[in-house]
Image (tube, helix red, strand yellow):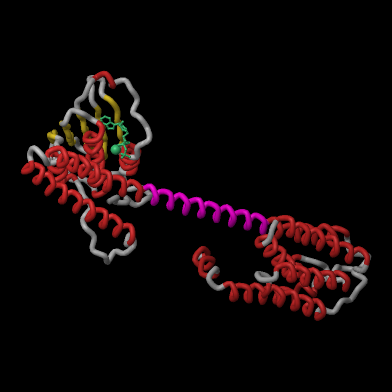
Amino acid sequence: MINNLWRRSRGHPRIVDAAVSAALFACSFPGSMITFPGGDLDVPWWPGVLLAGVSCAALLWRRNCPRTTVVLATVCAMAMAALGYILTVVLLGPLMVALHSLAAHTNRRTANTFTFTGIALLLGTALTVGPGNEPLVLKLLGPAAWLLLPTSLGTATRLRTEHAERAREKEARHRVTEERMRIARDLHDVVAHHLVLANIQAGAVARLIRDRPDEAEKIATVLAGTTYTAVRELKTTVGLLRHADDVETPQEPAPGLARLTDLTASFRSAGLAVTVTTEGERQPLSPGADVTAYRIVQEALTNVTKHATGGSAEVRLTYSEDRLDIAVTNGGSPARSSSPVPAGGYGLIGMRERAHAAGGRLRAGHRPQGGFEVVIELPLHPHSGPHEEIVPT
Ligand SMILES: Nc1ncnc2c1ncn2[C@@H]1O[C@H](COP(=O)(O)OP(=O)(O)OP(=O)(O)O)[C@@H](O)[C@H]1O
Ligand SMILES: [Mg+2]
């Protein structure tokens, strides 16, 4: 309930300020009547209440003018000390609140300067003008301690707020970077796949056009289809990025393993013979795992078309109870088996990031017996963690 009240009050700072000022003003009545037993001054209560009223009214501007508010409250407290009032926490309340605001909204140096100057002025006034028979503890130590407390608390509040703000900024930067990476991966996978196919098909057309014009014509038709699909998928990806927050916009379903047959057919048209084998009982995948599996197979086969010489590849899907293992392999000469995978491309990086985002693992490299393999282990149902599963495109 207190938490609830605190949360609500943060939305109405003016009302909170008015309530605090009114409460402190009410406290000044008993505060102005507390006298030191055996004191030699008979101080009436009303000047204390009047001075407290001035500093309580000043508190209404403590958020916009924290320095002026502290100065006003200090002057009022000095006047009280000079008149002979005992500076208890009740009378020092307005100055304490003003110092807390100052420490919470300015820097440490300003807060310390105003606090220590205020303490010095108050103690000086109490020593020189105030009643002589008041014990030093009441006159000096009490006020000093009461004024140091809000400054420390205000500084702690400011540090906590700054820390929370830095953490929020860091989180926002992290989200922007993640989003940028996601866009980069999506564009890479969509564009690279179709352009590589189109490039191979255009090369075949150029090679065959003189000797086998009929075949060249057929490949040219497929090429037109490839470029058309590229443009459509690119448009869909850009549309998804533009309307990521717009749930009303109808979206083309993200690709998944259900479209594996179309995918392998597109590679076949570019001269790559792809065989798909499935082991274990086929299981439904979460949307995130499904699109991850599709994109990784797509990029792995694109790489085979680009970098391998064999002209064939195998996609092996192995389902177990809670995991799907996918291996995309192609043959090749064993001479390159020990060489490391050259860096510089974005395909393998993207595959690895996609696998990690879906809670899986990816391994890629030259095979000892020759050729290349990409192996990915994907949990079928990633644990629902603190982050929502983001379904990539
Ligand atoms: N099937 C493969 N056969 C032989 N080498 C491969 C195969 N797949 C990947 N590689 C090697 O791994 C490197 C990294 O692949 P990656 O997909 O990251 O980059 P890329 O295909 O060169 O460029 P990009 O994908 O950014 O267009 C390739 O340059 C290639 O040398
Ligand atoms: Mg690649």
Quarter occupied by residue 155: bottom right
Ligand 1 sits in quadrant: top left
Nearest the viewer among 391 and 351 is 351
- How far across and down, in percent of the image, does residue 383 sit? 31, 44
Question: In the visual, does 108 lie left or right of 252?
Answer: right
Viewer-proximal residue, 119 or 145? Answer: 119
Residue 53 spot, x, y in % from top left: 74, 78
Residue 370 in the image: state x and y as whole percent.
Answer: 23, 22
Q: Residue placed at 16% from the left, 31% from the top?
A: 311
Q: Residue at x 21, y 33 (%)?
A: 328
Q: Viewer-proximal residue, 49 or 189? A: 189
Q: 105 and 100: which one is in front?
A: 105
Q: Residue furthest front?
A: 210
- Say which quarter of the image contains residue 34: bottom right
Tell whether 165 sits left or right of 369: right
Compared to residue 47, the image places residue 347 above or below, namely above
Residue pictured at 83% horizontal, 68% vertical: 86
The answer to whether residue 278 shows anywhere in this view is no
List x then y, in percent, for residue 94: 72, 70
Residue 161 is a magenta residue: yes
- Name the dominant secondary structure of the magenta segment: helix
Most distant residue in the left direction: 214
Q: Is residue 147 visible?
A: yes
Residue 197: image quadrant is: top left
Is 175 above or below relative to 270?
A: below
User: Residue at the spot x=23%, y=30% of the render?
Assistant: 308
With respect to residue 282, does 169 lie above or below?
Answer: below
Query: Is residue 356 magenta-colored?
Result: no
* Magenta range: 153-181
